[in-house]
């Protein structure tokens, strides 16, 4: 009975907004936690604290989603760093990419920069297979409903990477190899994770932060592994010129699979170069 009531509420809300055309902006705060316990006794507690402090700007970010009923642009908001501080960088990833979605044309693009080279990634736009639930909660002034999704993890999604085997402590079972992907000798990543979304039919836009979309309402919260993305503000009927929605065009156009191969090759080159340096040799990787 509760599920029937939920679906009726969704249908009524969507029908009231179906003829409206509008543009909005949603601000999200993203936070990723890092499990330093896997390093065990190999690293002192003081050193772990120093690394966490240095990574804070990298793990905690603010994003803006500018959207209409048909398309959206999701990008990181500029943040000034304190004088004398240096931002943490994951390898050659510089961040600051733009994710563009056109739901009407089934088109998704992401602009990224990797080791100084720009890429324009074309992504899969197949509608996510969400499982709608009847649980609700309040986020700000919006009533949100729960949905879950079993998602394949991108092989180079650093947010879900973890150390392989070492420092797990007594009594802890090793990872099931059938459920993880080996990235390097030291790092692995789960093949699948369960994503939880909270969306509101009060804003009947089938969109959300990052690559997430496909629900009967704007997604205000995402829980994905060690990352939580939470909406802190929604502004409707935005007319600011800075919120203009345009697809990115700069960079070499590649598929997600092609881009992952480029990243993997570069990581292997960097590892070999590091090993040669430790052995007294020299080398430099290139694209």
Image (cartoon, rainbow, N blue to C red):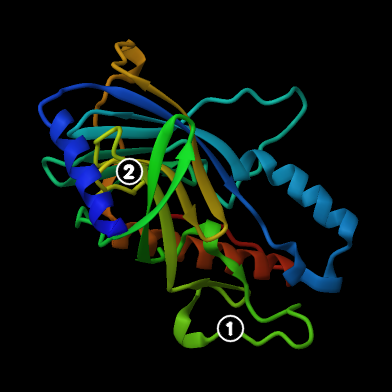
Instruction: Name the residue rendered at 24%, 43% in the picture.
Output: 9
Q: Which residue is mark 2?
A: 110
Q: Position of residue 191 (x, y in %)?
A: 43, 74
Q: Secondary structure at mark 1?
A: loop
Residue 126 lies left or right of residue 258; in this view the side is left
Residue nearest the viewer, comparing 16 with 3: 3
State the image coordinates of residue 91 (x, y, percent, origin top left).
58, 52
Q: Residue at 27% x, 43% y: name it.
A: 109
Q: Which image quarter: residue 272?
A: bottom right
**Residue found at the far front of this picture:** 1
Residue 118 visible in the snapshot: no
Count residues near mark 1 (Cα–Cα under 10 Å), then give few for <14, some for 14-19, many for 20+: few
Instruction: Name the residue beneath numbered marker 1.
Output: 175
Q: Give the distance between the C-alpha atoms of the residues marked 1 and 2, in whole angstroms.
A: 32 Å
Helix, strand or loop at mark 2: strand
Report x, y in % for residue 168.
73, 79
Q: Residue at x 29, y 47 (%)?
A: 213
Q: Which mark is nearer the camera, 1 or 2?
A: 1
In this view, 272 is above or below 233? below
Q: Nearer the viewer, residue 287 or 58?
A: 58
Residue 185 left/right relative to 156: right
């Amino acid at each position: 009975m509760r599920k029937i009531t939920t679906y009726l509420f969704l249908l009524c809300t969507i029908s009231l907004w179906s003829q409206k055309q509008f543009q909005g902006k949603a601000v999200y705060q993203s936070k990723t936690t890092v499990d330093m316990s896997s390093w065990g006794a190999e690293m002192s507690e003081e050193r772990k604290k120093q690394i966490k402090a240095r990574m804070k700007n990298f793990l905690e970010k603010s994003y803006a989603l500018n959207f209409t009923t048909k398309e959206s642009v999701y990008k990181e908001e500029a943040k000034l760093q304190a004088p004398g501080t240096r931002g943490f960088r994951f390898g050659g990833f510089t961040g600051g990419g733009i994710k563009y979605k056109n739901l009407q044309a089934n088109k998704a693009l992401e602009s990224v920069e990797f080791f100084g080279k720009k890429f324009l990634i074309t992504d899969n736009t197949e509608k996510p297979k969400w499982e709608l639930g009847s649980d609700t909660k309040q986020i700000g002034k919006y009533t949100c409903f729960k949905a879950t999704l079993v998602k394949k993890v991108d092989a180079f999604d650093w947010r879900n990477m973890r150390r392989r085997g070492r420092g797990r402590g007594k009594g802890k079972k090793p990872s099931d190899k059938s459920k993880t992907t080996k990235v390097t000798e030291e790092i692995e990543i789960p093949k699948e994770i369960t994503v939880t979304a909270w969306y509101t039919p009060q804003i009947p836009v089938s969109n959300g932060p990052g690559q997430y979309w496909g629900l009967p309402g704007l997604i205000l919260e995402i829980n994905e592994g060690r990352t939580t993305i939470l909406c802190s503000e929604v502004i409707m009927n935005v007319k600011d010129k800075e919120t203009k929605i345009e697809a990115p065009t700069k960079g070499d156009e590649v598929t997600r699979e092609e881009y992952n191969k480029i990243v993997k090759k570069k990581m292997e080159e960097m590892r070999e170069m590091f090993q040669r340096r430790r052995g007294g040799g020299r080398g430099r990787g290139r694209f």
